[in-house]
Amino acid sequence: MNSFPIVTAHTGCMNHPDHSLASLRSALALGADVYEEDIRVTRDGRLIFAHDDEVILANGQKASISSHSFSELNEQLDEDQLQPEAALTWIKHSGKRINLDVKTTDALEAALALVTKLDMVEQVFLSGCEYPAALEAARRTRHFRKLLNVNIGSFGEMSYSQAVVRACEEAREARCFGLNVPYPLVRTELLNAAHREQLAVYVWTVAEEEDMRRLAEMGVDSITTRDVARLMNVKAEMLTMKERAAFDQ
C-alpha cells in the first residue's frame, strides 16, 4: 500500500472554471499527482474538453457538441475547452499524469491520436468507462490504461458482496487496471477484493477533510477532489504522524 493515496485534481479545482488552464496550473502548483478532464468530440471528430454534450454558447444559445463542427464552436466556447493539446503539453512537461474521463466512446480515437502525437501514452489513462464502454475501449485500442467505472446500480440491486465480485470480474474482462468508485460506496470488503485481484481503487469526488482522512486510512489508491489544497494538507499531516510513530518505535 502506498504511504498516501495518489492525489487526483478534478477539473475546476480550487474554484477555477471547469476545463480551464487556470485549474490545471493550480493543481500542478499544489502538488497533485494526476489531473482529471472530461473529453468529447465534435461532429468532425475534434477532441474538446466538456462534461455534457449540451453547452451554452457565448451568444447564450444552447448547442450540441456532437452535432457541431469544431469551426462552428471555435468562437462560441471558452478557448481552453478547445485546446486539449495545450493542457496535455503542460502535463507532459510536468511529468505528472492526466485522467481523461471519456464521455462518449467516439472520443477514444481522437484522444489516442493526440496522445500518440505527443508521445504521452505512459502519462495518460482513461476513466468514465462503464462495462460496455470499457469493453469497447479494449476492443479499439490496447494503448490506453483504463479504470472501470463500477455499476452504481448493482450496489442497490444485489448484495454488496455480489456487486463487488461483479465489479472485479468486469474490470478483469475489460482489461482495466482498477475500479473507479464514488467514495460513499467504498468499504473495506471492496478494497480487499480489488487488491486481491491486483486492481487499484480510485475514489471520487471527495470534498470533506474527514472523508479524505478516512479513505486514506482505509487504503484507497487515489482520491479525486476539487479541493487539492485541503487534500495536500491531510497528506502532510498523516505522513508527519506516520514518521513520528516510526521514530517512537
Image (cartoon, rainbow, N blue to C red):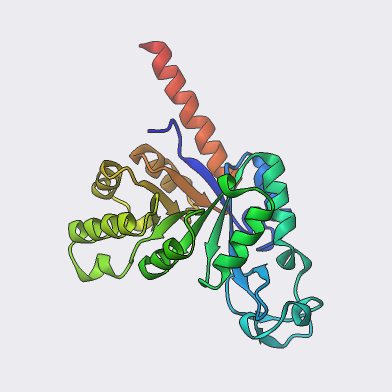
At a point 67% along the width and 43% down the height, the residue shown is 28
Residue at the spot 73% in from the left edge and 77% down from the top edge: 70
Q: Looking at this rendering, what residue extends furthest in the bottom direction?
A: 61
The relative height of residue 227 versus residue 29 in the rendered view (above or below) is below
- In the image, taking residue 161 as reference, residue 205 lies left or right, namely right
- Determine whether 63 is above or below 239 in the image: below
Residue 29 position in % (x across, y down) = 69, 41
Q: Position of residue 187 (x, y in %)?
A: 28, 50
Measured as percent of width and height from the top left, residue 204 is found at 45, 55
Question: Based on the displayed image, in which of its 4 quarters is residue 166 positioned?
Answer: bottom left
Horizontal and vertical percent position of residue 230: 56, 44
Q: Which image quarter is the C terminus in?
A: top left
Residue 25, visible in the rendered structure = no
- Tell me where residue 4 sits by quadrant: top left
Taking 232 as reference, is 147 above or below it? below
Residue drawn at point x = 42 percent, y = 42 percent: 221
Q: Which residue is nearer to you in this view: 102 or 79?
A: 102
Q: How many marks?
A: 0
Task: State the residue lying farthest toward the right.
Answer: 75
Identify the residue at horizontal 43%, vertical 12% (top origin): 247
Q: Quadrant of the N terminus?
A: top left
Relative depth, front residue between 92 and 10: 92
Q: Is residue 245 visible?
A: yes
Q: Nearer the viewer, residue 23 or 233?
A: 23
